[in-house]
């Protein structure tokens, strides 16, 4: 489960936000379920008596506004802090990859090396990243709205025609991860995938200097 | 037959609305089974990719435009004049026009199935430029656009009619602060529709112009902007979400109060929270666009979080209504309790995805699918069934079977949660929505199979509901005017009510005139 | 009436407030325009209702009234049936099909719409059921 085990520096921040929100959700659910079950069990029908006909209780009604307000205020602060750290883009990334989305695959161009990788739905392309190093992705689309998602990094960004998006990914461990198009883009949307190979910095440098032919 | 075609009576129109939504509900439910059957195992071949894209588009379109929202319109058509002691809606012929536009719109959307190239296959959101590409999407997409346009016009008409009726047609003594909570929630809904649906009508017209008259609103190569489409669509699309839940909040509030034998706790708070939700929901549209990277995420995130507060107030007041009550577990109440348990999961996950960092992972994954099915399926749909069991005796004059009803409830509850709880995990593990197939990685295969099993359990639940309608129709157990000990004016007249609703009205001195008259 | 006006006024004020906040947090013209239009729409209804209020005498706004006190009051004409809404709906459908596929169908739909609207206008003047409040409820007079 990537949420509990993210594979990038940005993903670690996002995973932290996820954990806080999951804990909050479970707490609220447990509290409300507890109240509901208590009320339903304790005041289930026993005879035809008419219960007390109270309609309001100012203290409890105001409490019912203030408690959720405080909770969402806290969650909003967590949100802003998390988002600020993830949206930040480094000035000097280790590598820059131009990612172009088209129906229905991806094209990855590695800046300064002349490497271009084109994919098709039947042979999805591979995105190569160096572990521990920040790669800036420049994302754009050639036709319709797509989205670039690497579940293991807990991160996605839309590829909207007419816009180019910049964001950083900093993988924290080597391995092969899945990447997907996640905005519905027509017939072969489901097969518009790619894979992410995170390798050591030395292997990455060797691969780039060989023009993308060296074994990873 | 001619009577039904030309009638302008709000009760007949309400029944027409509700029967039509039942028809489309069965179709959309069958489409859902196709989806789940296709996804039951990895690399399945029940349908092709092209067919699958049509199936989920029609399932979403039908459930949203032809089932969940219009069922509330139909019920409101039937109930609002009764609840405020009026003989009919303010504009009966406009009312008839809206129901026929709605029915014709629904048929038009589904006519696409017979078109060359098949029905619309761009999802219910029909994002441009995908939906403006003529090649490969034939007449089906155009039929979809025309149908949805008719639907949006019909909805605006309903909203105008409800607002005028509630404003002008209240009977003597029925001040606004004595209106039943369902009527209040429908007023909030109507205002939302009036603000939001014109945006949908506009954006559909723009798509039609772009497809057939050479306009370029959304085409970046001619200076257009796909983000503009998303803005215009979600101006409508997010308030629509609350159009589909506010009426059901009202239904639950009414039913919980009646079966707890207590007045609604925090009536004023309930009304104010409905308008707070409606108002805030106009300012959160772009939380569907957090991952575009060109939106003021902070503003939309903050506004979305705030909606949790009035929704929390509603939960607080529902529980307050049951507190110290005398709770009878009849079938309508069972469905309301189901609503409270399911919708809470939709609610807490809704707070999660109000946060952009969460959406960076969850957006457009099965996590979102699970979230909105918990609000619309486990929430609105359960409340709709509660409404059917609660008001059916009033509308038909006879009761539905309690035994079949509670069996229906348990099958739906078990089936629903088995179908949709696994989808949260599916989304967190990386399964995108709107895919016709997936690889056998991680926990995806068994979770998907579980979800499919849940869908089939729900199928048997709905089948039991159909059986219940049939059995009760032949048994015809007379309901009487007031089978549940109701509170609002619809229980003061006969079942079914006469043509102009009332022969006599009790004096109205509180929001529970029928209860007052009984004491 | 008072409740209704304050409802629209406060909705309009809310729309004004968030459109200002939105403009300064996003500088996005589309959304600001949308929220601004929403404010105008609410304000429009509020102002209109305020003006119309001078002549109104709504039974539903008087907390102490009952039906008995309002007996003899004319509720107005309530339509029971009309074939024109269905026909108008069909003509609107033709109009939209015409926009997509054929200008002939478009003009056919447009003509049909005009006919239906004309008949609807003529109909409202003379048909329907006249209804008057009585002590118990309401009564049909025709």
Image (cartoon, rainbow, N blue to C red):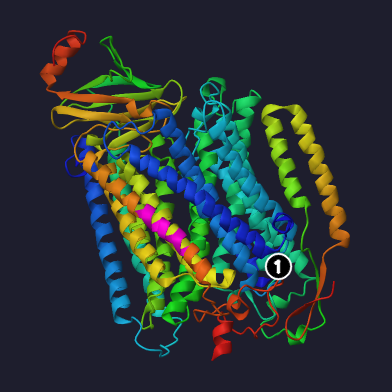
**In the drawing, does residue B180 fall left or right of residue C96?**
left
Residue B426, compared with residue B399, is above or below; it is above
Quadrant of the snapshot with the N terminus of chain B: bottom right
Read off the residue under disc 1. Answer: B88
**In the drawing, does residue B478 fall left or right of residue A145?**
right
Percent coordinates x, y for residue C138 in the rendering: 75, 78
Where does the magenta region start and end? Answer: B458-469
Report if residue B272 is visible in the image: no
Percent coordinates x, y for residue A135 in the rendering: 24, 25
Residue A209, compared with residue B341, is above or below; it is above
Q: Based on the picture, tell me whether residue A102 belongs to the magenta stretch.
A: no
Could you tell me which chain the residue with mark 1 belongs to? Answer: B
**In the drawing, does residue C28 fall left or right of residue C93?**
left
Residue at 44% over, 58% down: B381
Image quarter for residue B115? Answer: top right
Residue at 34% over, 60% down: B411
Residue closest to the eye, C59 or B488:
B488
Residue closest to the eye, B415 or A150:
B415
Residue at 52% over, 57% down: B279
Give the crowd class for mark 1: few <14, some 14-19, many >=20 residues within 10 Å.
Answer: many
Image quarter for residue A42? Answer: bottom left
Quadrant of the snapshot with the C terminus of chain B: bottom right
Report if residue A114 is visible in the image: yes
Image quarter for residue B394? Answer: bottom right
């Amino acid at each position: 489960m990537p949420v509990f085990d993210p594979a990038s520096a940005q993903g670690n921040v996002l995973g932290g936000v996820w954990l806080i929100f999951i804990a909050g959700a479970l707490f609220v659910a447990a509290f409300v379920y507890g109240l509901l079950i208590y009320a339903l069990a304790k005041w289930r029908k026993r005879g035809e008596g008419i219960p007390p006909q109270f309609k309001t209780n100012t203290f409890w009604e105001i409490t019912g506004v203030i408690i959720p307000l405080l909770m969402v205020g806290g969650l909003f602060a967590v949100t802003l802090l998390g988002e600020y750290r993830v949206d930040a883009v480094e000035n000097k990334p280790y590598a820059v990859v131009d990612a172009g989305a088209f129906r229905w695959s991806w094209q990855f161009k590695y800046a300064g090396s002349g490497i271009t990788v084109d994919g098709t739905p039947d042979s999805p392309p591979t995105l190569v990243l160096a572990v521990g190093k920040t790669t800036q992705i420049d994302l754009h689309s050639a036709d319709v709205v797509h989205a670039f998602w690497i579940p293991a990094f807990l991160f996605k960004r839309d590829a909207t025609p007419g816009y180019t998006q910049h964001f950083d990914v900093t993988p924290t461990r080597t391995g092969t991860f899945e990447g997907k198009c996640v905005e519905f883009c027509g017939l072969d949307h489901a097969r518009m995938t790619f894979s992410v190979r995170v390798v050591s910095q030395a292997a990455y440098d060797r691969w780039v200097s060989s023009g993308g032919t060296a074994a990873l | 037959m001619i009577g039904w075609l030309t009638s302008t009576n709000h009760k007949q129109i309400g029944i027409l609305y509700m029967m039509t939504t039942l028809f489309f509900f069965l179709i959309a439910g069958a489409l859902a089974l196709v989806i789940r059957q296709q996804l039951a195992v990895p690399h399945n071949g029940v349908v092709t990719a092209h067919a699958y894209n049509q199936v989920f588009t029609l399932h979403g379109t039908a459930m949203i435009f032809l089932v969940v929202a219009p069922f509330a319109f139909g019920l409101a058509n039937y109930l609002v004049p009764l609840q405020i002691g009026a003989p009919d809606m303010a504009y009966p012929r406009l009312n008839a026009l809206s129901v026929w536009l709605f029915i014709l719109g629904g048929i038009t959307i589904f006519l696409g199935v017979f078109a060359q190239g098949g029905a619309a296959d761009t999802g219910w959101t029909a994002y441009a430029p995908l939906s403006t590409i003529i090649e490969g999407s034939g007449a089906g997409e155009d039929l979809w656009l025309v149908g949805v346009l008719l639907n949006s016009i019909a909805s605006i008409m309903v909203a105008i009619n409800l607002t005028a009726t509630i404003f002008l047609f209240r009977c003597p003594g029925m001040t606004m602060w004595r209106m039943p909570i369902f009527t209040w929630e429908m007023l909030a809904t109507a205002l939302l529709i009036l603000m939001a649906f014109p945006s949908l009508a506009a954006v559909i017209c723009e798509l039609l112009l772009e497809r057939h008259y050479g306009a370029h609103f959304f085409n970046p190569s001619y200076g257009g902007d796909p983000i503009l489409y998303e803005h215009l669509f979600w101006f409508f699309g997010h308030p629509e979400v609350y159009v589909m839940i506010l009426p059901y909040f009202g239904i639950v509030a009414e039913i919980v109060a009646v079966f707890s034998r207590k007045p609604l706790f925090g009536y004023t708070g309930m009304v104010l929270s409905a308008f707070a939700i409606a108002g805030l929901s106009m300012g959160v549209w772009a939380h569907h666009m957090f991952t575009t990277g060109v939106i003021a995420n902070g503003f939309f995130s903050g506004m979305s979080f705030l909606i949790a507060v009035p929704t929390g107030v509603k939960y607080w007041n529902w529980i307050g209504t049951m507190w110290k009550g005398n709770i009878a577990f009849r079938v309508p109440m069972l469905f309301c309790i189901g609503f409270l348990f399911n919708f809470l999961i939709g609610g807490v996950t809704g707070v999660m995805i109000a946060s952009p960092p969460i959406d960076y992972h969850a957006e457009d994954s099965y996590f979102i699918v699970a979230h909105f099915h918990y609000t619309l399926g486990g929430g609105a749909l359960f409340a709709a069934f509660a409404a059917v069991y609660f008001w059916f005796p009033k509308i038909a004059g006879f009761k539905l079977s309690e035994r079949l009803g509670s069996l229906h409830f348990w099958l739906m509850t078990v089936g629903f949660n088995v179908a949709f709880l696994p989808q949260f995990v599916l989304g967190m593990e990386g399964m995108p929505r709107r895919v016709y197939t997936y690889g056998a990685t991680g926990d995806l295969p068994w979770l998907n199979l579980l979800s499919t099993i849940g869908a089939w359990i729900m199928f048997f639940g709905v089948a039991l509901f159909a059986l219940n309608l049939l059995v009760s129709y032949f048994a015809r157990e007379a309901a009487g005017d007031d089978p549940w000990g109701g509170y609002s004016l619809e229980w003061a007249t006969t079942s079914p009510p006469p043509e102009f609703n009332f022969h006599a009205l009790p004096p109205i001195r509180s929001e529970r005139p029928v209860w007052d008259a009984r004491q | 009436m008072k409740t209704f006006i304050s409802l629209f006024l406060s909705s309009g004020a809310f729309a004004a407030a968030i459109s200002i906040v939105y403009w300064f947090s996003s500088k996005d013209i589309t959304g600001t325009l949308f929220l601004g239009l929403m404010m105008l729409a609410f304000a429009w209804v509020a102002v209109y209702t305020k003006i119309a209020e001078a002549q109104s005498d709504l039974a539903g706004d008087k907390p102490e009234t009952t039906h008995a006190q309002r007996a003899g009051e004319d509720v107005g004409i309530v339509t029971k049936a009309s074939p024109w809404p269905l026909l108008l709906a069909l003509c609107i459908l033709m109009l939209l099909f015409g926009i997509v596929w054929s200008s002939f169908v478009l003009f056919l739909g447009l003509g049909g719409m005009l006919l239906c609207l004309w008949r609807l206008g003529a109909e409202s003047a003379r048909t329907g059921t006249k209804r008057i409040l009585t002590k118990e409820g309401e009564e049909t007079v025709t």
